[in-house]
Image: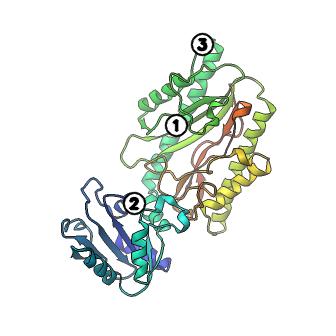
């Protein structure tokens, strides 16, 4: 944690201070921002206030008085709840604008960690509470140059294994050998391990209507063999098996045969065009030095799908933050499930993955790429981009 950097960010945003607090290890974001150990017992409330100028202040319970000793700033200890209220009021001082892990209207639920009662308490002292969403992203969810390097390195390997997976289908069809969705999923997992990659969950491998469930899970019981005429979707994500590594997460679609149906080709072209529209918006905004919110990128992508007549079949957000977890704590590309008003900024890594899901027509299609906003402010697609259906 760099207090001076946090204070500079507060001043740039015209916020007077950032109040971080926790009870029973509920706010993992506060622990990450402050560099605290979440495995330690936290049975009492604590508060840490970083003003835009001046020394931070700590408020801790008498039962756990050393909880914040690793952090800089003056410490005050409370016991009765009345003392907590009076001490917190004194710590925050005169009415001001204070950031907390709060999201107006719950638009960004990933940041809504502070309970309504604490917000009410702070507001009762005449302060204006604003969201810390962009601050959390800046100090917890942006990726270093080393993280960017690990993401790119993982991407090269994942793209190679994805191509190998389609080759496995090709070889099985050519030799009339049985290969099931589950067996191919396990092949990918084995190749991840052999290549020094790890993943939290196995990849999605599905044919025809199976991936119309966007989170379809292949099992030995539901798996079926690949055959001519099948549509195929493979979604795979992994990172280097090293501390601090960043995930890479992509989806590619194909067809077993020479000529996919006109409808399948149409929905692939639609999601491809939608993906490209989202990429173009991000690049254009940064080239012009204009702000770019996650919700705006979702709109740019989703509007292409809507215009093509498939809006109701695009049933999830356009993309998600990527970090040490495949779904990170930064801005999501979303104006459907939530309205993510956080801004894309240097160090952000995220997916763009429009999909069209037609279970009644025995098909589903999704294309997924990863983007990174480099530290020089230039957006980059970090791996290969699927422009045509894979013909198996």
Quadrant of the snapshot with the N terminus: bottom left
Which of the marked residues, 3 or 2, is nearer the chain's N terminus? 2
Q: Position of residue 79 (x, y in %)?
A: 21, 73
Q: CA distance from mark 3 to mark 2?
A: 49 Å
- The residue carrying mark 1 is 158
- The residue carrying mark 3 is 177
Residue at screen point 79% across, 51% down: 307
Q: Position of residue 6 (x, y in %)?
A: 40, 72
Q: State the image quarter where residue 118 is shown.
A: bottom left
Which of the marked residues, 3 or 1, is nearer the chain's N terminus? 1
- The residue carrying mark 2 is 29
Can residue 236 be seen here? yes
Q: Considering depth in this image, is 334 or 287 the residue closer to the camera?
A: 334
Give the side of residue 392 with respect to residue 123, left or right.
right
Q: CA distance from mark 1 to mark 2?
A: 29 Å
Q: Disc 1, disc 2: CB below 8 Å?
A: no
Q: Is residue 51 above or below residue 191?
A: below
Q: State the image quarter where residue 360 is shown.
A: top right
| Nearest-to-viewer mark from 1 and 2 | 2
SS under mark 2: helix
| Nearest-to-viewer mark from 3 and 2 | 2
Q: Position of residue 230 (x, y in %)?
A: 69, 24
Quadrant of the snapshot with the C terminus: top right
Count of numbered circles in the view: 3
């Amino acid at each position: 944690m760099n207090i001076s950097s946090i204070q500079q960010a507060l001043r740039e945003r015209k916020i007077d201070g950032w109040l971080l607090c926790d009870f029973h290890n509920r706010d993992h974001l506060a622990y990450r921002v402050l560099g605290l150990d979440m495995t330690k017992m936290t049975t009492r409330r604590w508060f840490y206030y970083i003003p835009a100028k001046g020394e931070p202040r700590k408020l801790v319970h008498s039962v756990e008085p050393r909880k914040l000793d690793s952090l800089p700033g003056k410490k005050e200890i409370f016991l009765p709840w009345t003392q907590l209220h009076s001490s917190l009021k004194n710590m925050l001082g005169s009415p001001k604008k204070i950031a907390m892990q709060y999201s107006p209207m719950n638009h960004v639920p990933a940041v809504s960690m502070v309970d309504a009662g604490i917000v009410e308490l702070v507001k009762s002292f005449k302060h204006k509470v604003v969201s810390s969403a962009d601050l959390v992203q800046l100090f917890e969810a942006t990726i270093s140059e080393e993280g960017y390097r690990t993401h790119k390195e993982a991407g090269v390997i994942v793209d190679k294994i994805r191509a190998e997976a389609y080759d496995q289908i090709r070889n099985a069809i050519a030799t009339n050998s049985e290969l099931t969705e589950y067996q191919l999923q396990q092949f990918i997992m084995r190749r991840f391990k052999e290549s020094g990659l790890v993943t939290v969950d196995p990849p999605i491998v599905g044919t025809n209507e199976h991936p119309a469930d966007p989170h379809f899970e292949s099992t030995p019981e539901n798996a079926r063999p690949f055959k001519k005429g099948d549509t195929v979707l493979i979604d795979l994500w992994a990172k280097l098996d090293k501390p601090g590594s960043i995930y890479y997460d992509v989806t590619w679609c194909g067809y077993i045969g020479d000529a996919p149906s006109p409808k399948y080709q149409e929905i692939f072209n639609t999601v491809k065009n939608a993906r490209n529209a989202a990429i173009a918006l991000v690049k254009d905004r940064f080239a012009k030095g204009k702000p770019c919110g996650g919700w705006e990128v979702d709109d740019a992508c989703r509007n292409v799908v809507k215009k093509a007549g498939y809006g109701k079949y695009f049933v999830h957000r356009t993309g998600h933050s990527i970090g040490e977890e495949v779904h990170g704590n930064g801005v999501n590309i979303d104006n459907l499930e939530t309205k993510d008003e956080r801004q894309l900024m240097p160090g952000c890594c995220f997916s763009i993955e429009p999909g069209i899901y037609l279970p009644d027509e025995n098909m589903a299609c999704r294309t997924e790429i990863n983007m990174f906003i480099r530290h020089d402010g230039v957006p980059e697609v970090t791996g290969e981009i699927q422009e045509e259906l894979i013909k198996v």
